[in-house]
Amino acid sequence: MKILVTGGAGFIGSHLVEKLSKEREVIVYDNFSSGKKEFLDGINCEIIKGSILDLEKLKEAAKDVEIIYHLAADPDVRKSYYEPIKNFEIDAKGTLNVLEAARINDVKKFVFSSSSVVYGIAEIPTPEEAPIKPISNYGAAKASSENYMMSYSNLYGINCLSLRYANIIGPKSTHGIIFDFYHKLLKNPNELEILGDGTQKKSYLHVKDCVDATVFTAEKLNKKYDVFNVGSEEQISVKGIAELIVNELGLSNVKFKFTGGKIGWPGDIPQMLLSIKKLKSLGWAPKYNIKEAIIDTLNYLRDKK
Ligand SMILES: NC(=O)c1ccc[n+]([C@@H]2O[C@H](COP(=O)([O-])OP(=O)(O)OC[C@H]3O[C@@H](n4cnc5c(N)ncnc54)[C@H](O)[C@@H]3O)[C@@H](O)[C@H]2O)c1
């Protein structure tokens, strides 16, 4: 039986496919909107170019599949503010389509890349039991996907797992704060625009730890429906990241230009730290600390230049 990875050509997806393909037959289903063919170079997998909005193609792709890892999405919170319907189509309806393909093909397990943003403004560290109160359209779409997983697991007996990721960073990053700061500094090494007042504090996890936890929890899944936070136990401020990057790049006298306010964009969550007690109780812990994860991301971007 095969494994299907939607969004398998993306940043996290390609790392996941690399890991899974060492032991299993893997099919990547991706429309390559942000995913890249070269991310799968040298990885043994079948590639199907298609959209998760194309239910017929998805149904075909999910034949003889035992597990679906569903990562395909538009992960841009900022864009979801300006394009709520488009975001809903991909991030909510797209998930329902993938669930439907799973149901029709009698797929046993469905693993979903959800996000810390489903909690909105929450207690710190945020446990899985915290209320779901999204404050962005992207968060609302992820929460809605989780709700459909609950109903599908109940109605059709597919074991579903929702993984609420913290901010994921590492090699092959194509978006996010490290990517943004690095490219801004490349353009102008004298000044760095920082969205908000720089005090926003968040938790970051290395992509290798993220895929490790994803496969680890998927293999352990024995409930109809389960949820895990996937993150690290450290936080760093936005200004702290800027200082670390400036230092690593050997720059001096960089002027930080703050756009002001407690948040960087509409729907931004100024404080994020997930409780990973539940994950740790299974015997899992991240291998990289935040600083190592940031430097690894930066080194990848520098090598690629
Ligand atoms: N990167 C993070 O910090 C983070 C945090 C929390 C959750 N997530 C979730 O993890 C998943 C992967 O995120 P990522 O950071 O690797 O982003 P990414 O943009 O690199 O990956 C998304 C992949 O989905 C594909 N895709 C987009 N729309 C599609 C469609 N309509 N049909 C088929 N494929 C489509 C893209 O081409 C890309 O390969 C997403 O679901 C995202 O919401 C990411």
Image (cartoon, rainbow, N blue to C red):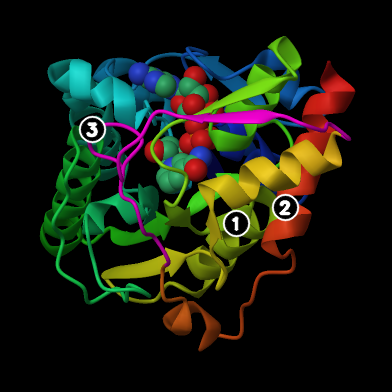
Would you say residue 124 sits in the magenta stretch?
Answer: no
**SS type, badge 3:** loop
Q: Nearer the viewer, residue 80 or 159?
A: 80
Q: Residues within 10 Å of mark 3 (few under 14, many from 20)?
A: some
**SS type, badge 2:** helix
Position of residue 97 measured from the top left corner of the image (x, y, whole percent): 23, 30
**SS type, badge 1:** strand
Would you say residue 263 sits in the magenta stretch?
Answer: yes
Residue 205 has which mark?
Answer: 1
| Alpha carbon distance from label 2 to label 1 | 7 Å
Q: Which residue is mark 2?
A: 293
Q: Amino acid at mark 2?
A: Ala
Residue 266 has which mark?
Answer: 3
Position of residue 249 measured from the top left corner of the image (x, y, whole percent): 85, 34
Q: Work out whether mark 3 precedes mark 1 in sequence or the reverse, and give the earlier one.
A: 1
Disc 2 + disc 1, Cβ < 8 Å:
yes
Q: Identify the residue at the far bottom of this view.
A: 281
The residue segment tinted magenta is 250-273
**Residue sitting at 65 percent across and 34 percent down?**
14
Q: Amino acid at mark 3?
A: Pro
Q: Main secondary structure of the magenta part?
A: loop
